[in-house]
Image (tube, helix red, strand yellow):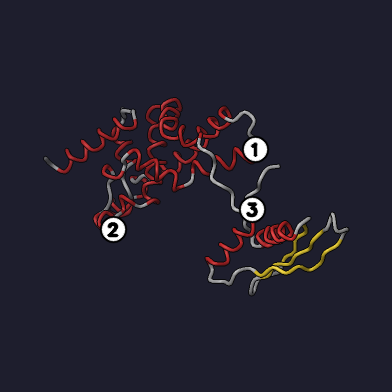
Amino acid sequence: MSRKSAKDKERAALEERIGYKFADKDLLERALTHISALSGGNRNASYQRLEFLGDHVLGLVISDMLYKAFPRGNEGELSRRLSDLVRKETCADVARAMEVGPALKLGNSESHAGGRLRDNILGDACESLVGAVFLDGGYVAAEALVKQFWQERMLKPPRPLRDPKTMLQEWAQGRGLPAPAYKEVERTGPHHNPKFRVAVSLPDRPGAEGLGSSKRAAEQAAAASMLGTLGIAVDKLDG
């Protein structure tokens, strides 16, 4: 069996697994072609443009699904769920469920380096497939594909949010800095209803302060304030 016929067989099997037959096989070919497989680096012949399109189609379809599935969900909850469902790691997991890896067209070096197993390549290829299905079969076809592979994931509880102290500590550790230091600056108010002011510091970074009805709450507020000065968005719990 030639390499071409083997690859055709793998892609036909992929079409069976995703429940969609392409009218334009060139679209499927492009959706599975990594730039490393192209001589001269012609990006337009790789899946990159389809990945861009698929990312936005995926976001639209899942936003619609979330809106209908969680009628009482507020904007914050829906946004968190959307972010979790479209992140690269989730798309890579979906690509594994689709068994996209064997059908990918990679350059020799990328293939030998384990590219068929890498999250970034699998996640990109998953998005490019969504984009290709959208172009080939329209919104309804893309919606059916997304529902098939994301519906069950959508109904799972969302990932726990990280509190500001955890986020700040992870940020510091990722840059080789010591753990943030917290210090109680002031305690005011009556014993039954105290107010705490806490300062947080990191080497070579502007300090920050936070207020709270407990020392822990003030530490969280201080961490959130420092994250804000660092330009890092803070996960927000509703209510």
- x, y percentage for residue 164? 64, 57
Tag 1 near tag 2, CB within 8 Å: no
Disc 1 designates what residue? 75
- x, y percentage for residue 92? 40, 45
For the point 36% across and 42% down, the residue is 95
Q: Amino acid at mark 1?
A: Glu
Whether 170 is drawn above or below 122: the answer is below
Q: CA distance from mark 3 to mark 2?
A: 36 Å
Q: Amino acid at mark 2?
A: Ala
Query: Looking at the image, which is closer to me, 50 or 111?
Result: 111
- x, y percentage for residue 213? 78, 55
Quadrant containing the C terminus in the rendered view: top right
Whether 207 is drawn above or below 72: the answer is below
Q: Amino acid at mark 3?
A: Val
Q: CA distance from mark 1 to mark 3?
A: 15 Å
For the point 29% across and 39% down, the residue is 29
SS at badge 2: loop
Query: Looking at the image, which is closer to me, 44 or 176?
Result: 176
State the image quarter where residue 226 is shown: bottom right
- x, y percentage for residue 53? 45, 39
Badge 1 crowding class, 10 Å Cα cut-off, few under 14, some 14 to 19, many 20 or more, is few
Disc 2 designates what residue? 113
Badge 2 crowding class, 10 Å Cα cut-off, few under 14, some 14 to 19, many 20 or more, is few
Q: CA distance from mark 1 to mark 2?
A: 41 Å
Tag 3 near tag 2, CB within 8 Å: no
In this rendering, position of residue 130 left or right of residue 164: left
Lower sequence index among marks 3 and 2: 2
Disc 3 designates what residue? 234
